[in-house]
Amino acid sequence: MRLADYDRSYHAKIMGIDEAGTGAVAGGVGVAGVVLDPATMDHLESVGVTDSKKVRSPERRAYLAGEVRRLAAWHRVILITVEEINEFGQGWAVTRRMRELVAAADVLSAIPVVDGN
């Protein structure tokens, strides 16, 4: 199910949450949350915001990220340092930071949906 359809089916704001990065061996990890109005999702899909792993060009990735930020009702990126990963472990650090985003979703009256890929 597309996230836009999920938003419409629940008649609620959805906060999409995901992580990116490889961890302490190659650097830190980032976690992000974004709340989009379902009405903007068709536009985002039409310009190519579907699967970030398929976007190869850094310029295209920057453009799409800008579109998401421009149209987001709310967004936040949290960077997890190598030191935090080394001290607590990557799984714990990512979970801790995602919980911060879930807490923000509660304040924003949004349903958090964590990408499970």
Image: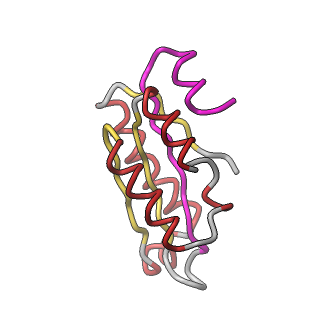
Q: Hey, which quadrant is residue 1 in on the image?
A: top right
Residue 116 position (above or below residue 9): below
Residue 64 point in image, percent of width and height:
47, 57
Q: Which of 23 and 35 is in front in this view?
A: 35
Colour style of the rendered protein structure: secondary structure
Looking at this view, name the residue that lies furthest to the bottom: 25
Which residue is found at the position 51% from the left and 65% from the top? 61
Residue 88 position (above or below residue 26): above
Q: Does the magenta stretch include residue 109?
A: no
Residue 80 point in image, percent of width and height:
43, 69
Q: Which of 115 and 94 is in front in this view?
A: 115
Q: In the shown orientation, is residue 26 left or right of residue 84? A: right
Which residue is found at the position 47% from the left and 14% from the top? 11
Q: Hey, which quadrant is residue 13 in on the image?
A: top left
Q: In the shown orientation, is residue 71 left or right of residue 22? A: left
Q: In the shown orientation, is residue 102 left or right of residue 25? A: left
Which residue is found at the position 52% from the left and 66% from the top? 60
Q: Give the range drawn in magenta.
A: 1-22
Q: Which of 6 and 40 is in front in this view?
A: 40
In this rendering, the count of numbered labels is 0
Residue 10 point in image, percent of width and height:
53, 16
Q: Does the magenta stretch include residue 11?
A: yes
Q: Which of 97 and 6 is in front in this view?
A: 6
Residue 25 position (above or below residue 46): below
